Image (cartoon, rainbow, N blue to C red):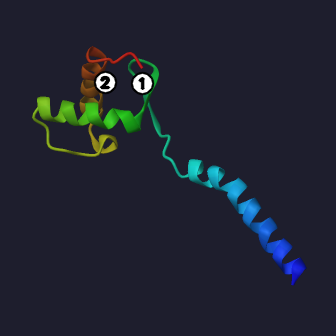
Amino acid sequence: MRLLSRNVATLLLAAACAMPVFVTGCAVHARVYDPYYHDYHPWGGETVYYEQWEHETHRNHMDFNKRSAADQKAYWDWRHQHEDHH
């Protein structure tokens, strides 16, 4: 019984130590490359600007990757005029 108790305690300690790795691994850290300005933007923070651009330019919401090359360029041009210097 003491051996079982020690093994369970060891397993729980190992799980507690490993938890931050698993939790951090679940976070999305996607970045998108802007080919016109040759820089990267973290997409998690980019969605606010993208939705603002759609609204200001009277475009329907669409996944960025499904937009035409001309629309993507128009977005990046607009985005760099509204740069937040991140």
Q: Quadrant location of the C terminus?
A: top left
Whether 74 is drawn above or below 67: the answer is above
| Nearer to me, 10 or 72 | 10
Residue 38 in the image: above or below residue 65: above
Q: What residue would you read off at disc 1?
A: 35
- At a point 24% along the width and 21% down the height, the residue shown is 78
Among all residues in the image, which is located at the extreme front?
2
Q: Which residue corresponds to mark 2?
A: 76
Give the number of the mark in front: 2 or 1. 2
Q: Identify which residue is drawn at 23% across, 45% down.
A: 62
Q: Is residue 71 left or right of residue 39?
A: left
User: The residue tagged with tag 2: helix, strand or loop?
Assistant: helix
Quadrant where the N terminus sits is bottom right
Residues 86 and 64: in front is 86
Name which quarter of the figure residue 44 lies in: top left
Name the quadrant containing residue 11: bottom right
Residue 56 image-quadrant placement: top left
Looking at the image, residue 49 lies above or below residue 5: above
Any mark on residue 43, and which? none
Q: What residue type is labelled 2?
A: Trp
Distance (Cα) linking label 2 and label 1: 9 Å
In the rendered structure, which amino acid carries the disc numbered 1?
Pro
Q: Evaluate if marks 2 and 1 touch, with contact meaning CB atoms under 8 Å apart.
A: yes
How crowded pointer 1 is (Cα within 10 Å; few <14, some 14-19, many 20+) is rated as: few
Who's the residue at 30% across and 32% down the image? 69
Q: Where is residue 58 in the image (x, y as percent from the top left)?
A: 9, 34
Tell me if mark 2 has few (under 14), some (14-19) or many (20+) residues whose alpha carbon lies within 10 angstroms of its own: some
